[in-house]
Image (cartoon, rainbow, N blue to C red):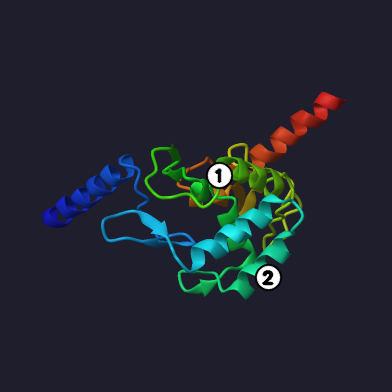
Amino acid sequence: RSETRHLSSRVRSCIQQQVSMGLYTHRAPPGYRKIFSGGIEIDPVQGPLMKEILELAATGVWSLDRLTKTARESGINCYGRPLSRSAVHRWVTNPIFAGPFYCKGKLITNYQHTPLISWETHEKIAKRLKIPGRMVKRTRRGFPLSGVFTCAHCHRAVTFFTVRKRYTYGVCCGCRRDGYSPKNLTEENLFFQLEQIVKGFA
């Protein structure tokens, strides 16, 4: 057990060191591939295809369904699987294609990989696809406020879950995927805030 803890500590230390150097340590996103020395590089086959999808998303004319269909027809895949609609939205709004990337909630700006698009193009995509209420989330229970509230950090829709058929809470899954750990929004706190807003208009 001591040896296992020591090895785990060394692995975490190496990963933190690579991140501090600007190397992307997670699995390669669509359009990139991992390299032996660490980090990622543009995939010669899927890199230009993913760049085209990103540029189409920045125009503001193409819908998310149309982008998904185009990505599937182009043969873009992620971890060996074709991109779904939610995966397309998650990846095209990810800043890693413009250079910076998130690691445990911190934006790493001293990146070492080659960007596919400029930061101005990424901001256009974020403005187009991260507007409140565009990505509607649903739960099995059919929570009445699903798709109404957005995260203050990334402006993506808050997803509501029901635990043990009694407790309902909301969380931003996008922030969790980016490595940021936001606080859960309980149902009681949610309705308390709504009550205060309504009282403010009374």
Furthest-right residue in view?
202
The residue under the point 74% across, 48% down is: 133
For badge 2, the amino acid type reads Lys
Q: State the image quarter where residue 63 is shown.
A: bottom right
Q: Does residue 143 appear in the picture of this structure?
A: yes
Q: Which residue is mark 1?
A: 118
**Is residue 111 placed above or below 40 in the rendered structure?**
above
Q: Amino acid at mark 1?
A: Ser
Note whether residue 26 is visible: no
**In the drawing, does residue 5 fall left or right of residue 156?**
left
* Residue reaching furthest to the left: 3
Q: Quadrant of the C terminus?
A: top right
**Viewer-nearest residue: 166 or 11:** 11
Give whichever of discs 1 and 2 has the lower sequence position. 2
Give the image quarter of residue 140.
Answer: bottom right
Q: Circle 1: is it few (<14), some (14-19), or many (20+) Cα within 10 Å? A: few
Q: Which residue is mark 2?
A: 69
Q: Mark 2 Cα within 10 Å, few/some/many (few <14, many 20+)?
A: some
Give the percent coordinates (x, y) of residue 11.
22, 52
Give the secondary structure at mark 2.
Answer: helix
Tag 1 secondary structure:
loop
Q: In 3D space, how far apart are the residues under numbered discs 1 and 2 (Cα atoms)? A: 24 Å
Nearer the observer, 26 or 141:
26
Q: Do labels 1 and 2 touch, CB within 8 Å?
A: no
Q: Quadrant of the N terminus?
A: bottom left
Q: Residue at x 45, y 44 (%)?
A: 102
Q: Is residue 49 left or right of residue 23?
A: right
Given residues 18 and 144, the one toward you in this image is: 18
Residue at 63% from the left image edge and 75% from the top image edge: 73
Where residue 90 sits: x, y (%)?
Answer: 58, 55
Q: Is residue 197 above or below residue 7?
A: above
**Nearer the observer, disc 1 or disc 2?**
1
